[in-house]
């Protein structure tokens, strides 16, 4: 399999380290707007590894992306950029007849007059608008194939297939006890994406009502996370699982809640109140005259790169799917989860826990597609495909998942 990896940041760099240990890969072109970052990802691999090459590529330039796919004879485009670049990459892969995979879907837009009650443009709507040509292409566009969304969706399908006869609620719950020494505020994942998903109106799905929205950080609950992480308060956050799972899994309700903490929420609210979450460019003085910049990009530039925090980070991160319903006439409640210890991921791969946990899942999916264990056509979420091959292979990668009976 020949892969064009677009984005050589924290997740992209972790992808290269993981896939370098697998035999299914023929070649991976590591592309980034910053050529030094793409080259650094390649140079970090073991000596003698010749299946990787670096390329400067602007992810917003659809023509250039198409040319790269064609020139390097790529079978699949793996998108490891932030959601701003989903659509040009998505369209380029469709035009060139390659498979496509991402870890975050096309951006949403709040309802113009009722943002905290009704959906406007939902996550992924722009992609699903191209469902017919993707189906006709005979290729797979596997969307939301990170950890959340991604593994969490695989868990939802596994629960429906093997653990439940009827499902009442599927609730993705994400929490951690990570700490970063020397920083008062150092998000462990892209602040650009974190602002987007945390300050947008969260989406909830109910079978009788469909998709609807609520206020950011609503419905707080304390969830007990496994393997020593313990209780973490979680709140509603906009996330792709709520838009994907109901398309393929029958459940009465689907939610996503994230363990942020009061301090983190307060800082996000302050950014919003000051307008620093905006992506609309403003004019600021520069050495050579006025320049136009996005406030959110300034915030990202002022914070440490999450990929560089591993040596200062301690603790574990947990991604999982909590499911309630019935099996054989009896009530059942389970939590399917995946925990990564930062000490382990740094020692084994040189990647901090959050980016490594995100990166391992698309690599597993690539291998399943390469071997034919996963196949199909059109736009598919992870829950559209058989879960057992994925969960078995994830364990083979040395990162097993777990299940806790809740009742």
Image (cartoon, rainbow, N blue to C red):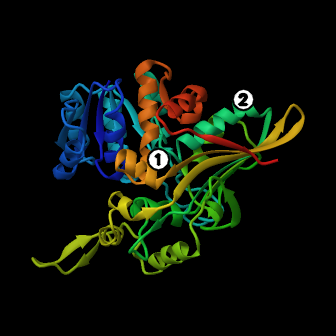
Q: Is residue 232 above or below residue 5?
A: below
Placement of the N terminus among the 4 image quadrants: top left
Mark 1: which secondary structure? helix
The residue located at (36%, 45%) in the rendering is 349
Find the residue positioned furthest to the left: 288
Q: Who is closer to the viewer here, 276 or 341? A: 341
Instruction: Give the left or right position of residue 8, taking residue 249 as reference.
Output: left
The residue located at (39%, 52%) in the rendering is 346
Q: Which mark is residue 162?
A: 2
Instruction: Give the left or right position of residue 232, taking residue 292 as reference.
Output: right
Whole-angstrom CA distance, mark 2 to mark 1, is 24 Å
The residue located at (42%, 59%) in the rendering is 189
Q: Who is closer to the viewer here, 59 or 351? A: 351
Find the residue positioned furthest to the right: 329
Where residue 55 sits in the image (x, y, percent)? 18, 41
Q: Check disc 2: other Cα within 10 Å, few if <14, some if 14-19, many if 20+.
A: few
Where residue 372 sits in the image (x, y, percent)? 46, 18
Q: Who is closer to the viewer here, 76 or 226? A: 226
Q: Earlier in the sequence, mark 2 or mark 1?
A: 2
Q: Which residue is mark 1?
A: 357
The residue located at (44%, 76%) in the rendering is 271
Q: Is residue 129 visible?
A: no
Q: Nearer the viewer, mark 2 or mark 1?
A: 1
Q: Where is residue 400, by image quadrant?
A: top right
Where residue 258 sits in the image (x, y, percent)? 59, 60
Mark 2: which secondary structure? helix
Q: Where is residue 234, by image quadrant?
A: bottom right
- Numbered marks: total: 2
Instruction: Give the left or right position of residue 96, taking residue 398 as reference.
Output: left
Q: Is residue 165 above or below residue 37?
A: above
Q: Check disc 1: other Cα within 10 Å, few if <14, some if 14-19, many if 20+.
A: many
Where residue 25 sits in the image (x, y, percent)? 32, 26
């Amino acid at each position: 399999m020949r892969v064009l990896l677009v984005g050589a940041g924290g997740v992209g760099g972790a992808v290269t380290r993981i896939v370098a240990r697998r035999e299914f890969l023929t070649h991976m072109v590591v592309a980034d707007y910053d050529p030094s970052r793409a080259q650094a990802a390649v140079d970090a691999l073991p000596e003698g590894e010749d299946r990787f090459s670096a390329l400067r590529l602007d992810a917003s330039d659809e023509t250039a992306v198409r040319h790269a796919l064609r020139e390097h004879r790529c079978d699949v485009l793996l998108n490891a950029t932030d959601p701003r670049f989903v659509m040009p990459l998505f369209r380029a892969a469709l035009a060139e007849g390659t498979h496509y995979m991402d870890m975050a879907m096309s951006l949403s837009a709040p309802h113009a007059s009722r943002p905290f009650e009704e959906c406007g443009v939902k996550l992924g709507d722009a992609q699903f608008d191209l469902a017919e040509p993707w189906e006709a292409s005979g290729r797979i566009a596997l969307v939301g194939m990170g950890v959340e969304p991604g593994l969490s969706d695989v868990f939802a399908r596994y629960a429906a297939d093997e653990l439940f006869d009827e499902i009442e609620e599927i609730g993705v719950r994400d929490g951690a006890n990570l700490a970063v020494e020397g920083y008062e505020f150092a998000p462990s994942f892209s602040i650009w994406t974190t602002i987007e998903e945390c300050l947008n109106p969260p989406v909830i799905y109910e079978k009788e009502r469909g998709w609807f929205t609520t206020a950011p950080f609503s419905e707080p609950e304390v969830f007990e996370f496994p393997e020593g992480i313990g209780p973490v308060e979680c709140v509603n956050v906009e996330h792709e699982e709520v838009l994907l799972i109901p398309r393929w899994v029958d459940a009465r309700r689907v939610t996503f809640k994230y363990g942020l903490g009061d301090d983190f929420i307060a800082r996000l609210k302050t950014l919003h109140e000051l307008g620093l979450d905006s992506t609309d460019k403003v004019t600021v003085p520069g050495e050579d005259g006025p320049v136009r910049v996005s406030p959110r990009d300034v915030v990202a530039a002022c914070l440490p790169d999450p990929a560089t925090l591993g040596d200062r980070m301690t603790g574990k991160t947990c991604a999982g799917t909590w499911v309630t319903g019935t099996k054989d006439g009896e009530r059942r409640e389970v939590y399917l989860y995946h925990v990564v210890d930062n000490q382990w991921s740094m020692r084994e791969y040189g990647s901090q826990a959050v980016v490594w946990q995100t990166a391992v899942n698309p690599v597993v999916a690539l291998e399943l597609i390469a071997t034919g264990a996963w196949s199909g056509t059109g736009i598919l979420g992870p829950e559209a495909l058989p879960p057992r091959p994925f969960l078995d292979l994830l364990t083979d990668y040395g990162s097993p998942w777990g299940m806790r009976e809740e009742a």
